Image: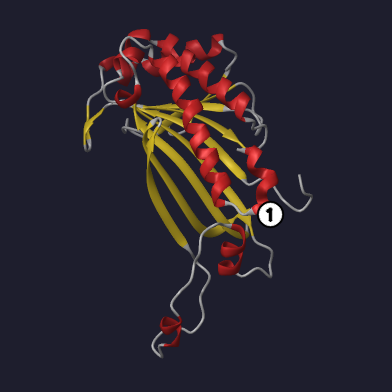
Amino acid sequence: MKDNIQIPLLEAVFELRWGEKSSNQYIFTADEQNLLAGQLSKSAKNSGYLIMEDLNPNLPKVPHIVRYRFLQKEDVSSPAFQLGLGIFTINQMKEGYKWESFKKTIDDNIIILKEANHNHFENIKETARIVLNYQNIFYLDKNDKIEEFFEKNFNLKFQLPKEILKNENICDKFNGDIITSFTLNSLKPIGQIRVLITTGMINGKKGFIFTISLESKVSDFIENHQNLDEAISLWCEKSHSNIKYIFKTMLRNNYVDIITTI
């Protein structure tokens, strides 16, 4: 890896959501609302996740908002999984990230969720959605101009028509903020890929936040009589391959050495 190139990954997140029957219409069982967190805590302890944090003790039970975090140790390199009403996430920061180990963590933690309440786990297939999300950061040097850095490092072009900046009612200088996004259909697995690139301040430094995610309905890819945990594991492999390809294709050659970090 080149000395002047930093690994851009901020966080990798796997997310499983369920319970939304239609837009903002949710259905959850009494067990999901009252027992699942305790059942998951027991299952997690059996797998070495001894730390449980209540992130929002005063928050009412709101769908798809994380409430509890489970950790094996209080270390930034250690993965965590989180639970809320109708949501289960697995989070890995840059420190300690490798795809092979993150994938194993996803597989292992899905089993923990399954063992917490097997009937509940298999019954969420109808409404379940899963997301694999990567958030990456590219820091700018103090002398870098946003638009020049963008075009130099990404296989995308950003250019304002000169006539806009010549208008006497408009500032004649680009202020340096860029937001660009697009979506693509994924065919294998069936789902939607979203790419978002924005400028912002990260840890006090100016840079680009580059987010790539793939989201699918479980009902679109799970096969008849296939266990949910097996289907999710196969989906993760295919989704990671698509995300890595987009990441690689959108970066120019001077970042080629960091592609393997995704």
**Dividing the image into 4 quarters, which one contains the N terminus?**
top right
Say which of 163 and 86 sits in front.
Answer: 163
Residue type at mark 1 is Asn
* Mark 1 burial class by Cα count in 10 Å: few <14, some 14-19, many 20+: few
Coordinates of residue 185 in the picture (x, y in percent): 36, 41
The part of the image, by quadrant, that contains residue 49 is: top right
Q: Which picture quadrant has residue 257? A: top right
Residue extending farthest bottom: 168
Q: Is residue 107 left or right of residue 189?
A: right
Res 85 visible: no
Please provide percent x and percent y for residue 130.
39, 29
196, above or below 128, in the image = below
Task: Give the residue drawn at x 36%, y 12%.
Answer: 226
**Residue shown at 57% from the left, 59% from the top:** 201
Residue 249 in percent (x, y) is at 55, 48
Which residue is under mark 1? 254
Where residue 164 appears, x then y in whole percent? 41, 81
Which quarter of the figure is the C terminus placed in? top right
Going by the image, does 258 lie left or right of 208?
Answer: right
Q: In the rendered view, tell whether residue 110 sits above or below residue 195.
A: above
Query: Does residue 106 appear anywhere in the picture?
Result: yes
| Residue situated in front as seen by the camera: 41 or 173 | 173
Please identify the quarter of the rendering in which residue 205 is found. bottom right
